[in-house]
Every structure is written in C-alpha cells, then in structure tokens.
Image (tube, rainbow, N blue to C red):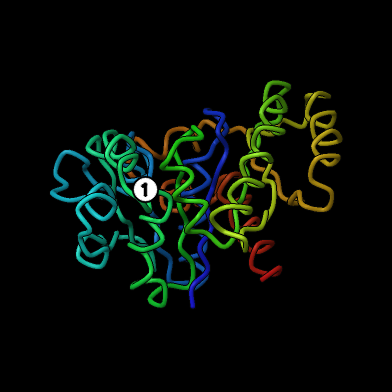
Amino acid sequence: MGKTVSIFNQKGGVGKTTTCVNFAAALGLKGKKTLLVDLDPQGNTTSGVGIDKAEIEKSTYDILINEESAKDIVIQTEFKNLSVLPANMNLAGAELELAEEENRFKALKKALAPIVMDYDYIIIDCPPSLGLLSLNALTASDTLIVPLQCEYYALEGLSQLLGTVRTVKQHYNEHLELEGVLYTMYDTRLKLNSQVIDEVNQYFPNKAYKTTIPRSVKLAEAPSFGKPIFYYEKYSKPAFAYKKFADEFLKKQ
C-alpha cells in the first residue's frame, strides 16, 4: 500500500508548494510511482507540473464534493513516474460545501482509498490555513512533513501547528505522525538560520532533516515554465538538495 504524506504548514510563503512539486518529482526520478494531490485552491502545484488550470474540466473539488472517481481525474504528467490530481479555483468553495456534510473531515480519505494501492507515494499540497481542506489532508495522511523557512516569524506558528496535529490525532486520524521538518530558503551566511534551527529542535527533537533547501533564483523560476527543478536546471544547487532530501526521506522508510 502506498504511503500518503501531507506537506503542511499553516503559514504561507515557506516553500510548501515548491517542496511538494520537487519532492514528488525526485521520488519519481528514483523509480517511485508518485501522485501529487493539489488541495490548494490557488492550484500552484497543478501549474508547477505543466498543467493549465484553465483547461481542467474536473479537479479535486469534484472528488470531494461530487464524489467523482479520483482515478478518472488523475492526469499523467510529462515527468517520470509523476501524476497529479489537479486543482483550480472551484476548490475555493469546497470548504463551505463540506461544512454541511456529516463526514466532512474524511471526504479526501474516502476519495483516495480506491487508488492508494496504485502508488508508492501520495504527496498532498495543503492550503496555507487550518481550514477543512487542510484537516481533510491530515485525516487522509499517514504522516506530514513541515517545510519551515529559516526566519524568526516561522517560529510563531509552531505551537498552533502542533496543536492542530494533536487535535487531528485525537479525533480523526490516530495514526498521523510527524515525518519530519524540512528547512527551506536556507542561507548559510545568516546567523539567524542556525538560531532558528536550534529553537526548532526544541519543538521537534530528532525530527529535522539534515538536508536544507537553499534560496535560489532558479528554484523560483522553474514554476513559471511548468517544470520541477530537475527538468529546468538539473545541475543547480536546489536540484541536488531536493534529490538529497528524497534520499534521506527514503532511507527512513
């Protein structure tokens, strides 16, 4: 059975979608059949793998609200072993509609259940909020990875994030575990980076990955071309970093 991993941080701008796209692509390059699930109404993960959001007929909205078959909506990307369940702005209304459903926290888990066996890994891109979509992702996941920007403000939401995970474990998904913390936008020249890392280790002892993802213009450019970094600039520092991160992740499995 495939493993389902949410990439989650309620704070925006921490490299969450960038990590989803490039982590999933790295797993694909390593021979792992991987599915990206775009659960963010902005649909940046969808466009990040070369899918035009404007041309999508059905999206993750339809598997959550209309109970459409996920298998019928999955799109095979041009990248090795990488498929996507796409999102568009229709998903923005899903939280309001889900709020009226009795099993509103388990809609995604139910939708993914028939295809979990088809993939080695399912990677979910969560919206930067603590709403119903994120709670659906965490309820459907085995573990979560927290991308964390190496800046002071990144620390402010950690206690809230941990509280959310505890709530999900208690009420909706007792098997949910923290897979690890990934430091993003890392700059070796800044002393603040090491200070943030020291403080985070108090929150997440032995959970931080040794691999760090550097700041990079190439990494910022790649989504505008609809490509993961490996297919845009494969010899760049972030390409090597995400491959190393995927290796570190796989060693722990």
Q: Circle 1 sits on which residue?
A: 38
Q: At 27% across and 63% down in the image, what residue appears?
A: 70
Q: Position of residue 40 (x, y in %)?
A: 38, 39
The reply, left or right, for residue 27 in relation to residue 109 is: right
- Local packing at callout 1 (Cα closer than 10 Å; few below 14, some 14-19, many 20+) is many
Question: Could you say which is closer to the camera, residue 143 or residue 109?
Answer: 109
Question: Could you say which is closer to the camera, residue 47 or residue 148?
Answer: 148
The reply, left or right, for residue 21 in relation to residue 147 is: left
Quadrant of the image occupied by residue 118: bottom left
Q: At 55% across and 43% down in the image, what residue appears?
A: 8
Q: Position of residue 67 (x, y in %)?
A: 23, 58
- Mark 1 belongs to which amino acid? Asp
The reply, left or right, for residue 187 in relation to residue 242 is: right
Please tell me whether mark 1 sits on a helix, a strand or a loop: strand
Q: Where 217 falls versus 70 (above or below)?
A: above
Q: Quadrant of the C terminus?
A: bottom right
Q: Position of residue 90 (x, y in %)?
A: 22, 38
Q: At 54% across and 36% down in the image, what residue appears?
A: 15
Question: Could you say which is closer to the camera, residue 87 or residue 46?
Answer: 87
The residue at the far front in this view is 102
Is residue 77 something that shows in the picture?
Answer: yes
